[in-house]
Amino acid sequence: MSAESAGTTVLPSGEEIAALGQGTWYLGEDPARREQEIAALRLGVDLGMTVVDTAEMYGEGAAEELVGEALRGRREEVFLVSKVLPGHADRRGIVAACEGSLRRLRAERLDLYLLHWRGRWPLEETLAGFADLMEAGKIRYWGVSNLDVAGMTELTALPGGDAVAVDQVLYNLSRRGIEWDLLPWCREADVTVMAYSPIEQGRLLGAEALHAVARSLGATPTQVALAWVLEQGMSAIPRSGSPDHVRENRGAVDLHLPAEALDALDEAFPAPSGPTPLEVL
């Protein structure tokens, strides 16, 4: 089955990837839900949500194993992302960690490999490991997660650091702090921003303002929250544990938010009025 389109985001290389992808945090941890989660991931690929994001941390590898099973025979249809734990991010450790992720994913390479957050190892060590993995053909691009402007400035000043493709950060209607400094910085530096927890792990969905906008548009609060992130010109990777949830998420791609809806959301969820420390989950 050929995949539909879920919109696109452009990487620094010029390659286009799906704007709406699939996250896997907490997937693969309940055997009773395994078949449903696999079906959800496969449906997401069918619907064009072909960025699949995971990490060695998620379920201590269980999410990667689930993704590997779900994508059996379909690896070439997806843009596969995983993340290395900071404790493994020295030059030798990152190579070993990547090889472990590839085994669990049943894949020969990752499309994007991210430093999950900054730890004790110098960034020079991590960059050297990324370079080794790229030379070996085990990753196509590398990036970071949870790095603020200071961290990104330090990273890109290092030899080879300006090759960073992505900064994956917490961003949603209730977490807009990056709009003050990190988002403009990344746009100026041509670094793609990828939003995780774009509906705040469901906590956003109780907001009456979100429900009001959704009712006015004949959409669901989830779709409005996701469409708002996509309107900002970045990719989003909501977790989708059931086929019904995947279909709901996919509806955000086709949802246009008119000016009055955007104004109502801005009033309920104001943009930052000054610098805000980078928030994480």
Image (tube, rainbow, N blue to C red):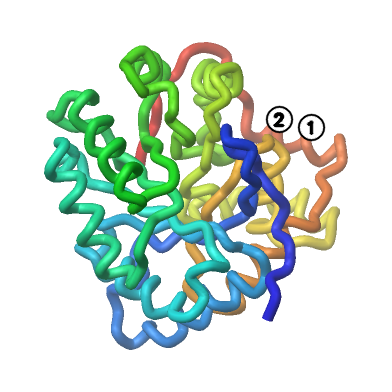
The spot of residue 43 in percent (x, y) is: 59, 77
| Residue denoted by label 1 | 263
Measured in 3D between alpha carbons, the distance from the residue under mark 1 to the one under mark 2, in whole angstroms, is 6 Å
How packed is label 2: few (under 14 Cα within 10 Å), some, or many (20 or more)? few
Relative to 85, 203 lies left or right: right
Relative to 174, 227 lies left or right: right
Q: Residue at x 39, y 31 (%)?
A: 279
Q: Residue at x 23, y 25 (%)?
A: 123
How packed is label 1: few (under 14 Cα within 10 Å), some, or many (20 or more)? few
Q: Amino acid at mark 2?
A: Glu
The spot of residue 143 in percent (x, y) is: 40, 37
Tags 1 and 2 touching, CB below 8 Å: yes
Could you tell me which secondary element the residue under label 2 belongs to?
Answer: helix
Relative to 97, 49 lies left or right: right
Kindly identify which numbered label has been placed on residue 267.
2
Image label count: 2
Residue 201 seen from this side: yes
Q: Above or below — where is 26 with respect to 112?
A: below
